[in-house]
Amino acid sequence: MLEKVDLSKKLSKEEYKQKMPQLEARLGRLQRECKALEIPVMIVFEGFGAAGKGLQIGRLIQSMDPRGFEVYPIKNETEEERMHPFMWRFWTKTPARGRIAIYDGSWYRRVLIDRFEKRTKENEMPMAFHSINSFEQQLSEDGSLIIKLFLDIDKKEQKKRFDKLEKNKETAWRVSQGDRERNARYEEYADMMEEMLFATDTDYAPWTIIEATDKRFAELKIYTTVIKAMADQVEKVRGLALEAEEKKTIAGETDVVAEIARQTGNEMKDLQVSILSKADLTLSCTREEYKEKLDRLQKKIEKLHGELYRRRIPVVLGFEGWDAGGKGGAIKRLTAKMDPRGYRVNPTASPNDIEKAHHYLWRFWRAIPKDGHIAIFDRTWYGRVMVERIEGFCTEEEWKRAYREINDMEKDLYDAGAVVIKFWMHIDRDEQERRFKERQENPEKQWKITDEDWRNREKWDLYEEAVNEMLMRTSTDYAPWVVVEGNDKYYARIKVLKTVVDAIEKRIKEK
Amino acid sequence: MLEKVDLSKKLSKEEYKQKMPQLEARLGRLQRECKALEIPVMIVFEGFGAAGKGLQIGRLIQSMDPRGFEVYPIKNETEEERMHPFMWRFWTKTPARGRIAIYDGSWYRRVLIDRFEKRTKENEMPMAFHSINSFEQQLSEDGSLIIKLFLDIDKKEQKKRFDKLEKNKETAWRVSQGDRERNARYEEYADMMEEMLFATDTDYAPWTIIEATDKRFAELKIYTTVIKAMADQVEKVRGLALEAEEKKTIAGETDVVAEIARQTGNEMKDLQVSILSKADLTLSCTREEYKEKLDRLQKKIEKLHGELYRRRIPVVLGFEGWDAGGKGGAIKRLTAKMDPRGYRVNPTASPNDIEKAHHYLWRFWRAIPKDGHIAIFDRTWYGRVMVERIEGFCTEEEWKRAYREINDMEKDLYDAGAVVIKFWMHIDRDEQERRFKERQENPEKQWKITDEDWRNREKWDLYEEAVNEMLMRTSTDYAPWVVVEGNDKYYARIKVLKTVVDAIEKRIKEK
């Protein structure tokens, strides 16, 4: 989840001053609502050292009624705590109904700092993750709202902050030997973070990454995240209560909380990790370069295809992207010199009746390639979290748990030896319009464009939001997403081929 | 789950002939109902070799419409299957909505036979369990009913069956070298079975143990289990459909399926694994023996208590049992010579307001002993699956998932180094009545007996059912249940002390 985070995000002082008062008022109101509805709220602050956890907690609680929350700084275990099971100190610090508990550091220590410093042994890791998920699931099922914030800064920024703290006599003590060590081995520690995020990002207690380089931006995103989560939970709990009362109609009344949830949801969009917006769509490549590289890469793939077959390595390539994003063209160039007996392109249309009668992943499982074969999917199982989400073909609950289901499936493929890559063919709105019009005007291409394409185009913003969340939650080291800058078709095709070649060569080397 | 199974269960030919026709009719009807409601049904047969999986499947399908089910024999992987991820062949064999799939052997191979024969490596085990649970959870959340039957026979019976099969030329081929190997190392294989049952007995796909020594009994229990599960699922799906239609009232109409569910539920009780009924309540001990042993054991405990303290081993002892079962007396003898600074008895009453404002396990977590200390619970967290279940203080969903929550908690304690034992103080109804009366007549003991005790006594059958299920689902090797035969108080107290001494000595030796 971390590799695709944009740490350069900023917020101007003016914007900050303009937005915060409203958020502060909302948070105060929601605290009262949660109290009235007896919702226990747990807010977890994790992340890199010096990312500003303490500072941000201080700012968050400024809008809260101090009689309604506790802040728990989670440091090294006390003598008393060391003499109890690890989860004891957290179980005993769970909030009562209607109260808020804020954790500065948390039970994640065990799979982060404790692991880094080898206090948690590697063979204890599966059970540690099991305990954590069991803890969160139990509390969530018992009605607790769990908000998990991960404050992210990069190695350089972290070092800068440590240096600054150390220079000042008053703050020097705050930088420990361990902090320096984790900065020196930042990448290694980040890998542990990444593994932790993967293992514990659940539908009942999802992580939100807070880009923490700019403090104002971080504060705004934390407030927004917390407010949205609380407002949603209030709505949910009320909904259940209403259902129990045989759905009393409260029509007509404007509900303040529903309005807060809606409004904050909109504001949230601007703060989301935007992976797509980072793509540099000016990237391009000349026709000569293209021809030369294409030829070389296609020959390479031809050779590697035989190698894969001999070594029995299966390959799964998924293609998603904007309509007219160039999926078809890329697949065509990719397969041009492949042995047709060794690969298969699976176009994914709306499910037919037999497919509808099964779990949504069933039809993709059926098309999983055997060892040594390549399966290319033109549109994929990610339809669940894009079109099905946006068109309401599945419930919110269903698409929210799909991230984990999909991650699990891809992990199964990887564990069985497969190379798994997903491509997002990315173009901007103008480029799409240009291509749509070209298709309409060219009789040879008219079949490629339908009214539905134009209708989908109107939902660009909704899709962008869904795609960003999808890229964030399902790009893993065993099955990464590759965003292909596609305004220039030549550049895009070469990038796809090159990515596939590199991944196969890497896997062959590993074997 | 296996250690407490009674494999001597039998069914007479007469009873069999009398009961089966009705069950067969019910099953046929439910198959049609499931088809109409588009419920996919998966029935898994697992268990020891020669336990009769094939035979029982043959009998089960006799009552089904052959157009509505498939039977999948899961043997060694074919060449084709070996070239795909392990779960591929199971994903592609999931039933369509409204159909039934029966698996003779299943995805559990991977953690049973394949593990035994070292095709699954030990470091692959956590991921294998993860894949299995993810598979079942996804299908269950998608609406599938998953019924898992575990056919159990003992080592001797298995050997006898193999011998018989081998003697006959026509069937000799059915006994493989692997079968013989698994029989020779029966205990080792049974341990793997036990670990598998623990890791995969979930609220969405629970296991049912089928005592398979007697074929008629096994058949009856399989039919009953399948019918009950299908009837419950039909009722659930209909309920959801009705809710969607704003709860149309169907009052007045007698619902056949509801009647089947109720009736089968009652019949099921006789077939449940009854752990309590196996307890030999005639066990007793003379006063002299008692005094001598008590003295010796108490001295031992005094010594061990110091040893525990020095070695920093925590001990958690839970006491449950029938009212007047002798919990208090046993605890008194147990602690008589302990250093009062090193142990604590926690009486568990109805939760107070603060406790009610938290997760039900919170108050027990707070009382977890520190290293080197002993915590004794007079009534425990098991209230969730006994009194709360029976009195409706929590929902069915809540007590069903409590088995796993409790197992997880006890595993956390064990992993932190604790000795964990749970005692069920067992007496029969007559003995309880005798003790109640004695309490009423003795002015010194009158405080011990209330009207509520008499009321609870009327619910003996409900409790017995709940206790049997609790013992079954939560007796683990790391936190076993010990049923204490309590009609004779002397015998019971000695057994408790002896069990505690043995467990502590064992743990000290391991350290």
Image (cartoon, coloured by chain):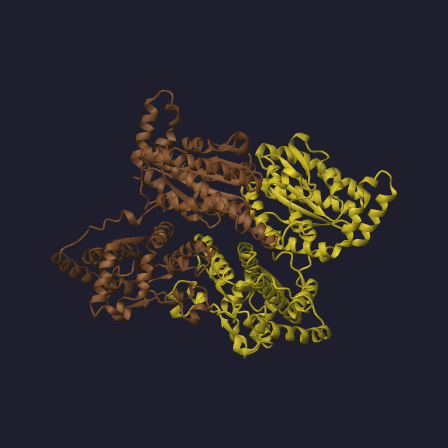
Chain colours: A yellow, B brown
**Residue pushed farthest front?**
B252
Q: Position of residue B132 (x, y in %)?
A: 49, 44
Query: Which of the 4 image quadrants contains residue A489?
Result: top right
Q: Residue at x 44, y 30 (%)?
A: B58
**Residue pushed farthest top?**
B169
Q: Is residue B349 above or below residue B118?
A: below
Left or right of A466 on screen, residue A105: left
Q: Is residue A22 above or below residue A293?
A: below
Q: Is residue B337 visible?
A: no
Q: Position of residue A54 (x, y in %)?
A: 56, 72
Q: Residue at x 60, y 76 (%)?
A: A63
Q: Residue at x 71, y 36 (%)?
A: A335
Q: Position of residue A62 (x, y in %)?
A: 59, 77
Q: Residue at x 84, y 43 (%)?
A: A439
Query: Which of the 4 image quadrants contains residue A279?
Result: bottom right
Q: Is residue B80 visible?
A: yes
Q: Position of residue B96 (x, y in %)?
A: 58, 38
Q: Is residue A311 above or below residue A96?
A: above
**Residue pushed farthest bottom?**
A170
Left or right of B51 on screen, residue A386: right
Quadrant where the image shows the C terminus of chain B:
bottom left
Q: Nearer the viewer, residue B130 or B50?
A: B50
Q: Is residue A130 above or below residue A509?
A: below
Instruction: Give the number of callouts.
Output: 0
